[in-house]
Amino acid sequence: SFELTQPPSVSVSPGQTVSITCSGDKLGDRYACWYQQKPGQSPVVVIYDENKRPSGIPERFSGSNSGNTATLTISGTQAMDEADYYCQAWDSSTVVFGGGTKLTVL
Amino acid sequence: EVQLVQSGAEVKKPGESLKISCKGSGYTFTNYWIAWVRQMSGKGLEWMGIIYPGDSDTRYSPSFQGQVTISVDKSINNVYLQWSSLKASDTAIYYCARGDSESGGTTNFDSWGQGTLVTVSS
């Protein structure tokens, strides 16, 4: 079955750039999106269709998707970006989420 | 403004039945897919299934097929998630989420409900 694999945790210093990866078989042939979830809150989409940002999402969030890997990049990371991040894609008629990555801003 | 408002927290005993709801507003309810997503305490997001309110077309994750039922009452803009016999392992937060595309081809979920905490304990 189709699976998406993310690193469990990533850390970054404030102001630096961080990338979170999401790996899956031929993921680059599918649309990938990314959700941010802060403690006690519902998920919010931050990147969709690989590299589009919904209105209200800061420009420091960007995405790419090629081969077997989708990547979420946060430039100039801020303390408010500390959260769990999940990638998501479709496999036939079902939705698959990655296991999630906890981003710590040190 | 698009809103998904879910029913309140539930405390149930193993073996009991339960139906939770998700009410959509601020958009044409029948034209957008609605998904259900489980999140167990301290764990990640798990997609359970999806329904298209316009024609009740429903798809389930293999992991949840036969374990839950997703339904819709489009006369009142509600989507439901139902269990016939709860287990302690069903304890989790359940989110509903709206697919982003009105014309099909949903790739992501652009609006989420606030979540419903279901606790199953004897």
Image (cartoon, rainbow, N blue to C red):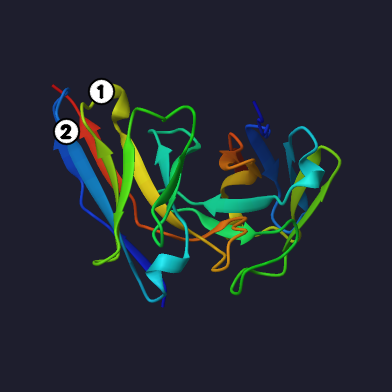
Q: Position of residue B45 (x, y in %)?
A: 49, 39
Q: Mark 1 Cα within 10 Å, few/some/many (few <14, many 20+)? A: some
Q: Amino acid at mark 1?
A: Ala
Query: In the image, A106: left or right of B14?
Result: right
Rendered image: mark on residue B17: 2
Please tell me which residue lies in front, A34 or A93. Answer: A93
Q: Nearer the viewer, mark 2 or mark 1?
A: 2
Most extreme residue toward the right is A67
Camera sees residue A30? yes
Q: Quadrant of the N terminus of chain A?
A: top right
Q: Position of residue B53 (x, y in %)?
A: 39, 59
Mark 2–mark 1 CB contact (< 8 Å): no
Q: Position of residue B48 (x, y in %)?
A: 44, 38
Q: Amino acid at mark 2?
A: Ser
Please tell me which residue lies in front, A33 or B62. Answer: B62
Q: Position of residue A34 (x, y in %)?
A: 63, 52
Rendered image: mark on residue A92: none
For marks 2 and 1 on the same chain, the one whose residue lies earlier in the sequence = 2
The residue where tag 1 is placed is B88
Q: Mark 2 Cα within 10 Å, few/some/many (few <14, many 20+)? A: few
SS under mark 1 = helix
SS under mark 2 = loop
Query: In the image, A8: left or right of B83?
Result: right
Rendered image quadrant of residue B92: top left
Label 1: chain letter: B
Residue at the (34%, 56%) spot, across then down: B114
Spatial CA span between label 2 and label 1:
12 Å
Query: In the image, B104: left or right of A21?
Result: left
